[in-house]
Image (cartoon, rainbow, N blue to C red):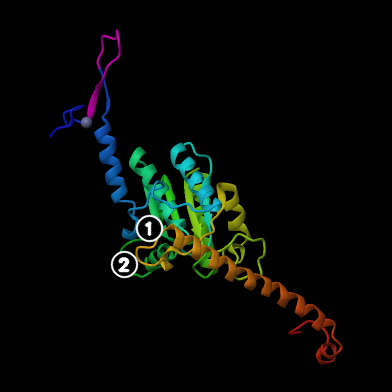
Amino acid sequence: MPCPLCDDTGWKPVESAGHPVRRVERCDCWREGLGRQRLADAGIPRRYQHCTIANFTAYNESLERAAEKARQIAGAFPSAGKGLFLEGPPGVGKTHLAVAVLKQVVSTTGARGLFYDTRDLLRVIRSTYDASIHTTELDVLRPVMKADLLVLDDLGAEKTSEWVEETMNLIVNTRYNERRLTVFTSNYPDIPDDTDPDSLLFRIGHRMRSRLHEMCEFEAMDGGDYREMPANGGIDDLITLWKTRRKQSLPSRAGRQARAQLREPSVRDGKADLKWPGGRAGS
Ligand SMILES: [Zn+2]
């Protein structure tokens, strides 16, 4: 059945009262078609394709806050000032929300959206250095830098090296300078400790972290791992998983502090002093 508004021309007449000249504008069906095409091109992995903000289960305050922020950013596009950085342990729904924002923006506005797992992206860029592959680094980087909305999933998962840092800084800085919106997810908590190998700062470095704070709002998400949910499980199972996880994470954090305190007296300890030849370690 042809479109009742435009008869499949993609242009619909605009009625303007008392105006003798008939005008046309892009039809709704054209915008929807474009949105569908752009969505298909966005590279969203199959297992996240069903994700929307409406079907995200928020069963605690941190998840409600994150969902609300996702709703705001998706609704305000393209005038949303800042992007979004979702941090939290695996399985709390960070990628779900990031994909949901991407899907809503692309399907309602027809904007160019792109999803990349950070490690996949780096692997693809690296593969272009192989002479037998006929894509260049720029072929891969251009759409990443130019996308109206980019999701970079699992930031910090790749072990840092000078090359990784340079590549990521190029992508992030270009998008920042061009005022393009980016949504990040990361399993690494944003704690200001660059000696803790599990901190975001340790994984991505000071320069990148401060740039991310300029361009994104940070939302820390806490919850159970939905992948551990029993088949046919529900919200109660998630809450149980969340509570168990909290109990497990508290002792390990307390343990880290206890170990730090143990280290101190041992340095002042007489026996330790005797064994210590003086001077800096390794000198
Ligand atoms: Zn139409």
In the depicted structure, whether residue 254 falls above or below residue 242: below
The amino acid at mark 2 is Ile
Q: How many marks?
A: 2
**Image mark for residue 179:** none
Ligand 1 contact, mark 2 (Cβ < 8 Å): no
Q: Tell me if mark 2 has few (under 14), some (14-19) or many (20+) residues whose alpha carbon lies within 10 angstroms of its own.
A: few
Which residue, given by chain and number where applicable, does mark 1 sit on?
140
Relative to the observer, which residue lies in front, 250 or 7? 250
Instruction: Check disc 2 and report its element: helix, strand or loop.
Output: loop
First in sequence: mark 1 vs mark 2: 2
What residue appears at the point 49 percent right and 60 percent down from the top-left corner?
A: 239
Separation of residues labelled 1 and 2 (CA atoms): 12 Å
The amino acid at mark 1 is Val
Q: Quadrant of the N terminus?
A: top left
Q: Position of residue 219 (x, y in %)?
A: 55, 52
- Majority secondary structure of magenta residues: loop
Closer to the observer: label 1 or label 2?
1
Relative to the observer, which residue lies in front, 65 or 137? 65
- Left or right? Give the position of 103 relative to 152: left
In the depicted structure, whether residue 37 falls above or below residue 201: above
Instruction: Check disc 1 and report its element: helix, strand or loop.
Output: helix
In terms of image quarters, where does ligand 1 lie? top left
Tell whether position 156 is magenta.
no
- Left or right? Give the position of 32 relative to 235: left
Which residue is the extreme one toward the front?
Answer: 236
Q: Position of residue 231 (x, y in %)?
A: 35, 66
Q: Position of residue 102 (x, y in %)?
A: 40, 48
**Image mark for residue 133:** 2
Q: Which residues are magenta?
A: 11-22
